[in-house]
Image (cartoon, rainbow, N blue to C red):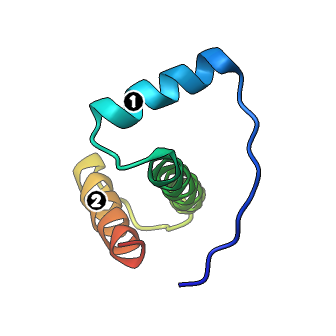
Amino acid sequence: MVTEMITLKLEKGFLKEVDKTVKERGFHNRTEFIRNALRENMNEARMKEAYLRICHLKGASKKKITDEEIHVAKEKAFEEIAKRFR
Protein backbone atom coordinates (compact mmCIF):
# COMPACT_ATOMS: atom_id res chain seq x y z
CA MET A 1 0.00 0.00 0.00
CA VAL A 2 1.40 3.36 -1.01
CA THR A 3 0.87 6.09 1.54
CA GLU A 4 1.13 9.83 1.25
CA MET A 5 2.29 12.09 4.05
CA ILE A 6 0.07 14.95 5.13
CA THR A 7 0.54 17.71 7.69
CA LEU A 8 -1.91 18.06 10.54
CA LYS A 9 -1.87 20.92 13.02
CA LEU A 10 -3.45 20.45 16.45
CA GLU A 11 -3.60 22.58 19.57
CA LYS A 12 -1.23 21.41 22.32
CA GLY A 13 -4.03 20.51 24.71
CA PHE A 14 -5.87 18.48 22.11
CA LEU A 15 -2.65 16.72 21.08
CA LYS A 16 -2.11 15.72 24.73
CA GLU A 17 -5.61 14.19 24.70
CA VAL A 18 -4.78 12.34 21.48
CA ASP A 19 -1.54 10.99 22.98
CA LYS A 20 -3.40 9.88 26.12
CA THR A 21 -6.00 8.07 24.01
CA VAL A 22 -3.30 6.46 21.85
CA LYS A 23 -1.69 5.04 24.99
CA GLU A 24 -4.95 4.02 26.72
CA ARG A 25 -6.42 2.28 23.68
CA GLY A 26 -3.21 0.50 22.74
CA PHE A 27 -2.42 2.15 19.42
CA HIS A 28 1.22 1.96 18.37
CA ASN A 29 1.40 5.62 17.42
CA ARG A 30 -0.57 8.74 16.55
CA THR A 31 -0.73 7.83 12.87
CA GLU A 32 -2.44 4.51 13.58
CA PHE A 33 -4.93 6.24 15.87
CA ILE A 34 -5.71 9.00 13.35
CA ARG A 35 -6.15 6.50 10.49
CA ASN A 36 -8.55 4.50 12.65
CA ALA A 37 -10.50 7.61 13.65
CA LEU A 38 -10.82 8.66 10.01
CA ARG A 39 -12.01 5.19 8.96
CA GLU A 40 -14.59 5.13 11.75
CA ASN A 41 -15.83 8.58 10.76
CA MET A 42 -16.08 7.63 7.09
CA ASN A 43 -17.97 4.43 7.92
CA GLU A 44 -20.35 6.36 10.16
CA ALA A 45 -20.99 8.88 7.38
CA ARG A 46 -21.70 6.05 4.93
CA MET A 47 -24.06 4.37 7.39
CA LYS A 48 -25.94 7.65 7.93
CA GLU A 49 -26.22 8.10 4.18
CA ALA A 50 -27.55 4.56 3.79
CA TYR A 51 -30.01 5.11 6.61
CA LEU A 52 -31.28 8.30 4.96
CA ARG A 53 -31.77 6.39 1.72
CA ILE A 54 -33.72 3.72 3.58
CA CYS A 55 -35.84 6.35 5.34
CA HIS A 56 -36.55 7.97 2.00
CA LEU A 57 -37.91 4.65 0.74
CA LYS A 58 -40.17 4.26 3.78
CA GLY A 59 -43.70 4.82 2.62
CA ALA A 60 -42.81 4.41 -1.05
CA SER A 61 -44.49 1.02 -1.10
CA LYS A 62 -48.26 0.68 -1.25
CA LYS A 63 -48.05 -2.56 0.75
CA LYS A 64 -48.86 -2.23 4.46
CA ILE A 65 -46.09 -3.55 6.71
CA THR A 66 -45.63 -3.64 10.45
CA ASP A 67 -43.03 -1.78 12.49
CA GLU A 68 -41.39 -5.15 13.24
CA GLU A 69 -41.05 -5.87 9.51
CA ILE A 70 -39.47 -2.44 9.02
CA HIS A 71 -37.04 -3.10 11.87
CA VAL A 72 -36.04 -6.49 10.41
CA ALA A 73 -35.56 -4.96 6.95
CA LYS A 74 -33.36 -2.17 8.38
CA GLU A 75 -31.22 -4.68 10.26
CA LYS A 76 -30.71 -6.77 7.11
CA ALA A 77 -29.85 -3.67 5.07
CA PHE A 78 -27.30 -2.46 7.61
CA GLU A 79 -25.74 -5.95 7.79
CA GLU A 80 -25.31 -5.94 4.02
CA ILE A 81 -23.83 -2.46 4.04
CA ALA A 82 -21.48 -3.34 6.90
CA LYS A 83 -20.16 -6.34 4.93
CA ARG A 84 -19.06 -3.99 2.16
CA PHE A 85 -16.91 -1.91 4.50
CA ARG A 86 -15.09 -4.70 6.32
Query: Residue 21, which numbered label?
Result: 1
Relative placement, left or right, of 45 versus 64 is: right
Classify mark 1: helix, strand or loop.
helix
Quadrant placement of the C terminus: bottom left
Q: Mark 2: which amino acid?
A: Glu
- Residue appearing at x 37%, y 60% in the figure: 64
Q: Is residue 23 above or below residue 58?
A: above
Q: Going from the N terminus, do you reach mark 1 or mark 2 first?
A: 1
Q: Residue furthest top?
A: 13
* Residue 78 image point, x, y percent: 36, 63
Classify mark 2: helix, strand or loop.
helix
- Residue appearing at x 50%, y 51% in the figure: 44
Q: Is residue 19 above or below residue 50?
A: above
* Residue 43 image point, x, y percent: 49, 58
Residue denoted by label 2: 75
Q: CA distance from mark 1 to mark 2?
A: 31 Å
